Image: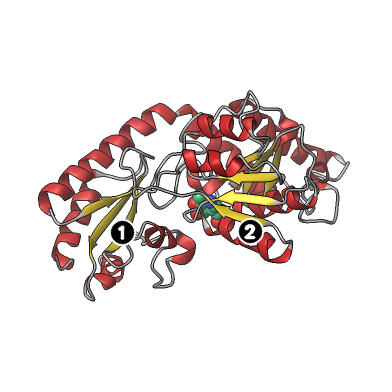
C-alpha cells in the first residue's frame, strides 16, 4: 500500500497508462478474492466496508428484487438491524425476528415455520458469526432451508471472512460482505459478493465504477491493502486458528480458576477470536470497561461502534442478561500473547467486585 501511495497516482477509470496500471491492481485483488471464495470475479464488488455493502444489499433486495419481507434476529450487527428496520418503516416491508435460544443460537425450527408462509418474497439475513458472542451459524443448513422456501439468503460474514475458507460455490448464498480490518487489512474498505444470477441496482449512484454497482473513484490503496491482508489470512488460516484457539482455551481456563464467579456468554465453541465474559452486575462492575481502559487493556462491551456509549449491548439484552451481568467482549488475534492474557485476568480480578 505505501509503495503504491508513494509511486502511483493513476485513477483506475482513466484510459491512459497510469490509470490502466491501477486498474490492473484492482482487478488483481478482485480475481484473488473470487478465487479464494470460489466464485466469479464479476460477483465481487469493492465498497467502503461492510456497512455500505449491507445497505446496498438491503436496498437492492427491496428495490430491485421485490422483497416484501425480511427475516433476521435481534442479535445481528446494527448495520443489519438498522437496514431491516429502515425498510420496514419506510418501504412497508414485513419484518420478522427468528427466535434465539439462551445461548444466542438461531432456532432453525422457528426459521422453517416462518418460511412456510411463502406468500411474500423474502430475504433471510443471518450472520455467520456473531461479533459479540462468537456464535456460528450452520450456513449450509440455513441455505438449504432458504432454498427450499425460495427465500434469498444473505449472511453477514464480516467476522468469519479470512478466518474460515467460506467456499461460496454451489449457490449456497445470494450475498455476503466483508470488511478488510477484520483480517488485519486497512479500515474503511471491504467488498460484497452478489450472486451472479441476481441483478440489483447500485445504492451509491454517480459514475459507472464497479461495473455500475458502486459509483465513485475506487479506494485503490485500500483495495490493494485488502488484497494483501486477504492473501495472508488465507495462507496462514489453519495455523492462525490453531494459535488463537489455544489462546482462547488458555484464557478460559485461567479465568475459571482465578475468578470462579465469571460466566461465559454465548456458545464458547464458536469463533476462535471472540470470548464474551459476564461478571455479576452491580454499580461498581458497570465501570469495569473504563477501569480496563485505564489499565491499558482494549476490550469492549459490545460492537466497537456502540462501545463509545455506555449503553448495554443489544445482544446481551436480547439474551435476557442485561440485568444480571456486565459483559466484557474479548477479541483475540495471532498477535495476542499469553502475557497479555495473564495481565487481563489479573486486572479483572483486582477491579471487579464479585
Ligand atoms: N457486521 C459485523 C458482524 C461487524 O462486526 C461489523 C463491524 O464491526 C460490521 C458489520 C460493519 O463493518 P464496518 O464498520 O467495517 O462497515
Mark 2: secondary structure:
helix
Q: Nearer the viewer, residue 98 or 315?
A: 98
Number of other residues with Cα within 10 Å of mark 1, as a class: few under 14, some 14 to 19, many 20 or more = many
Identify the image quadrant of the C terminus. Answer: bottom left
Earlier along the polypeptide chain: callout 1 or callout 2? 2
Number of other residues with Cα within 10 Å of mark 2, as a class: few under 14, some 14 to 19, many 20 or more = some
Q: Position of residue 192 (x, y in %)?
A: 66, 42
Side of 106 where 81 appears, left or right = right
Q: Nearer the viewer, residue 346 or 141?
A: 141
Is label 2 within 8 A of ligand 1 (CB to nearest ligand atom)? no
Inspect this view and state whether residue 308 appears.
yes
Q: Which labelled disc corresponds to residue 283?
A: none
Which residue was labeled with disc 1? 328
Q: How is the image coloured?
A: secondary structure
Q: Nearer the viewer, residue 125 or 131?
A: 125
Mark 1: secondary structure:
strand
Identify the image quadrant of the N terminus. Answer: top right
Side of 70 where 275 appears, left or right = left
Q: Is residue 85 above or below residue 96?
A: below
Q: Residue at x 49, y 46 (%)?
A: 182
Q: CA distance from mark 1 to mark 2?
A: 26 Å
Q: Which labelled disc corresponds to residue 83?
A: 2
* Number of the front mark, 1 or 2: 2
Q: Is residue 319 above or below residue 26?
A: below
Residue 333: name its quadrant: top left
Q: Residue at x 43, y 49 (%)?
A: 100
Q: Nearer the viewer, residue 279 or 19?
A: 279
Residue 262: name its quadrant: bottom left
Residue at the far bottom in the pictured view: 283
Q: Position of residue 272 (x, y in %)?
A: 36, 39
Amino acid at each position: 500500500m505505501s509503495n503504491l501511495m508513494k509511486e502511483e497516482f493513476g485513477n483506475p477509470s482513466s484510459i491512459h497508462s497510469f490509470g490502466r496500471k491501477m486498474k490492473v491492481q484492482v482487478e488483481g485483488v478482485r480475481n484473488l478474492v473470487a478465487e479464494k471464495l470460489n466464485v466469479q470475479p464479476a460477483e465481487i464488488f469493492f465498497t467502503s466496508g461492510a456497512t455500505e455493502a449491507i445497505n446496498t444489499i438491503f436496498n437492492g433486495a427491496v428495490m430491485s428484487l421485490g422483497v416484501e419481507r425480511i427475516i433476521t434476529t435481534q442479535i445481528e450487527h446494527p448495520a443489519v438491524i438498522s437496514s431491516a428496520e429502515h425498510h420496514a418503516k419506510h418501504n412497508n416491508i414485513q419484518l420478522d425476528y427468528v427466535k434465539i435460544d439462551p445461548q444466542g443460537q438461531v432456532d432453525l425450527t422457528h426459521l422453517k415455520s416462518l418460511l412456510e408462509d411463502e406468500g411474500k418474497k423474502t430475504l433471510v439475513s443471518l450472520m455467520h458469526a456473531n461479533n459479540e458472542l462468537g456464535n456460528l451459524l450452520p450456513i449450509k443448513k440455513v441455505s438449504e432451508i432458504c432454498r427450499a422456501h425460495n427465500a434469498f439468503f444473505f449472511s453477514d460474514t464480516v467476522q468469519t471472512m479470512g478466518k474460515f475458507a467460506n467456499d461460496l460455490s454451489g449457490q449456497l448464498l445470494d450475498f455476503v460482505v466483508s470488511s478488510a480490518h477484520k483480517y488485519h487489512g486497512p479500515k474503511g474498505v471491504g467488498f460484497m459478493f452478489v450472486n451472479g444470477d441476481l441483478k440489483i441496482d447500485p445504492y451509491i449512484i454517480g459514475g459507472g465504477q464497479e461495473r455500475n454497482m458502486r459509483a465513485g473513484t475506487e479506494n485503490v490503496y485500500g483495495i490493494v491493502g485488502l488484497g494483501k491482508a486477504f492473501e495472508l489470512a488465507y495462507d496462514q488460516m489453519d495455523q492462525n486458528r490453531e494459535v488463537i484457539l489455544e489462546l482462547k482455551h488458555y484464557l478460559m481456563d485461567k479465568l475459571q480458576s482465578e475468578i470462579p464467579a465469571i460466566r461465559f456468554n454465548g456458545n464458547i465453541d464458536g469463533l476462535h477470536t471472540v470470548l464474551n465474559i459476564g461478571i455479576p452486575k452491580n454499580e461498581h462492575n458497570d465501570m469495569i470497561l473504563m477501569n480496563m481502559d485505564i489499565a491499558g487493556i482494549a476490550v469492549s462491551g459490545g460492537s466497537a461502534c456502540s462501545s463509545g456509549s455506555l449503553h448495554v449491548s443489544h445482544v446481551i439484552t436480547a439474551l435476557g442478561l442485561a440485568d444480571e451481568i456486565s459483559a466484557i467482549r474479548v477479541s483475540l488475534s495471532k498477535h495476542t500473547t499469553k502475557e497479555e492474557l495473564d495481565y487481563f485476568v489479573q486486572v479483572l480480578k483486582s477491579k471487579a467486585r464479585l
